Image (tube, rainbow, N blue to C red):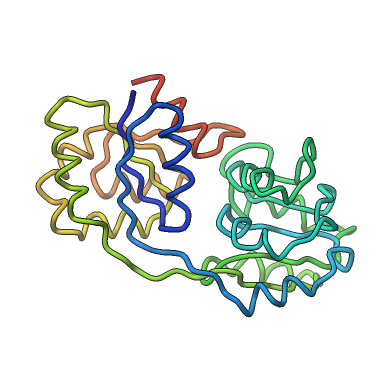
Amino acid sequence: MAAFVLTQPLGRVESIRDALLAAGHDCLAMPFSALYAHADGLSVLARLAPADHDRIVFVSPAAVAFAAAALGTAWQDGDRVCAVGAGTTEALHEHAVLRPGTQPIMPPRPPYDADSLMPLIDTDSVHSLLVVKGEGGRRDWLDALRAHGKRVTEVIVYGSHPVLPDAGVVDALATRLGDGADVATLLSSRAAISAMVGWQPLSPLWSQLTARPALAVHPNVADRAREAGFRDLRLLQSGQSLLAGAVALAAQM
């Protein structure tokens, strides 16, 4: 059994925590942001017809989770639906956005990001794209698509705001470390790592935590983790979701 420190935002961390607990692992939730629904964006999404777009791109698992309630069965065509990565693909099935057995268009191997998806959507046969996303994030790939003559409709279905974890999680982490538990950290964003570094209650345990394994979802997240002092970093493998990667990591500890 591993003890995972989960840094994903509120609104996303719960599903990962529940799945890992069900698999017999220990979890310490340490979110530094919280997700919330964009009602206007969801209303717009509910009125759109998927047939009006050659490709429908979901940029994250959170985008799928928030959008799912606004989507009807007409969206279940995997030939149009695109996922930035394996975690987003898992969310598409978890929330029944895709029919069982249907696979979206997604990058064949890591890194799972917009750059890897671009060759699959920036093609002569694609003229119109619907991009379902959260606030912020990269815009360069969207600008590139528009510069290449594509019609890109962005629908923002969620946002986020900063929060601080329950200070009690530090005591729980200190206990796990003191007991010699197999502790590992799941890292999904550069912003969460920066927030961890700046959170004073965690400072006394930082050297111990960063000496333990950490799993990063993307090379640029791993780069930020190295800057912050994590010394035993792993990356998601081809086709792995964060949950699958965490289970695989636990088996190696």
Q: Residue at x 58, y 39 (%)?
A: 110
The answer to whether 2 is drawn above or below residue 153 in the figure is above
Q: Quadrant of the N terminus?
A: top left
As drawn, the residue found furthest toward the bottom would be: 40
Q: Is 144 positioned to the left or the right of 18 in the image?
A: right
Q: Quadrant of the C terminus?
A: top left
Residue 222 location, x and y as percent?
Answer: 39, 44
Q: Residue at x 22, y 55 (%)?
A: 197
Q: Residue at x 15, y 40 (%)?
A: 207
Residue 114 location, x and y as percent?
Answer: 62, 55
The answer to whether 53 is drawn above or below residue 206 in the figure is below
Q: Is 73 positioned to the left or the right of 66 in the image?
A: right
Q: Residue at x 35, y 45 (%)?
A: 6
The answer to whether 95 is drawn above or below residue 71 in the figure is above
As drawn, the residue found furthest toward the top would be: 252
Residue 103 location, x and y as percent?
Answer: 76, 40
For the residue pair 39 and 235, the one nearer the viewer reads as 39
For the residue pair 195 and 99, the one nearer the viewer reads as 99
As drawn, the residue found furthest toward the left would be: 204
Quarter location, residue 69 = bottom right
Residue 179 location, x and y as percent?
Answer: 14, 26
Quarter location, residue 235 = top left
Marks counted in the figure total: 0
